[in-house]
Amino acid sequence: SGPRLGVKSIDAGTIHTCVVTLTVGTETTGTTAYCWGRNNSGQLGDGTLTDRRAPAAIPAIQYSTIATGGAHSCGTDLNSQALCWGQNEKGQLGNGTTIRSLTPALVAKP
């Protein structure tokens, strides 16, 4: 039997959805985040502003949880660090700026 794919965390916003999948293989366990839907502010985290009708992977980071907002998303990685991406005009990404991010950005430590 090969690797199994399951859902670890899922959240649906108004215009986009994100999921963390859990892949269990014979030697490794990994998690990958995927988002799909509207991407006008970079809320899918894939580095583009392209709307996706199917799940698009958020590259390079393994996640344990994920959550969606109106036009932004946040997750925690396997080291319990918070990351957010997407719309940021009110500072909702928590990175000390008001500039949107098309890819995950670390939340500033309090």
Image (tube, rainbow, N blue to C red):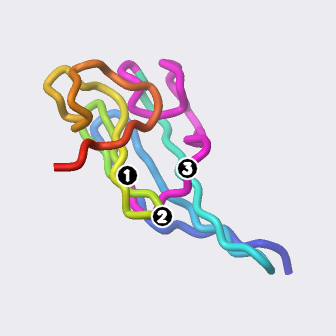
Instruction: Tell me residue 36's x, y (percent).
Output: 49, 37
Q: In the structure shown, which secondary structural element does the residue marked by tag 2 occupy?
A: loop
10 Å neighbourhood of mark 1: few (<14), some, or many (≥20)? many
Q: Quadrant of residue 81?
A: bottom left
Q: Nearer the viewer, residue 4 or 47?
A: 47
Label of residue 75 in the image: 1
Q: Nearer the viewer, residue 96 or 35?
A: 96
Q: Nearer the viewer, residue 82 or 23?
A: 82
| Position of 35 relative to 52 (above/below) | below
| Relative side of 24 to 10, left or right | right
Image: magenta residue range: 40-66
Q: Amino acid at mark 1?
A: Gly
Instruction: Tell me residue 7's x, y (percent).
Output: 52, 66
Q: Residue shown at 64%/66% (left/top)?
A: 30
| Position of 32 relative to 98 (above/below) | below
Q: CA distance from mark 1 to mark 2?
A: 10 Å
Label of residue 61 in the image: 3
Q: Name the residue tied to disc 2.
A: 78
Q: In the structure shown, which secondary structural element does the residue marked by tag 3 occupy?
A: loop
Q: Are the residues tagged 3 and 1 within 8 Å (C-beta)?
A: yes
Q: CA distance from mark 3 to mark 1?
A: 10 Å
10 Å neighbourhood of mark 3: few (<14), some, or many (≥20)? some
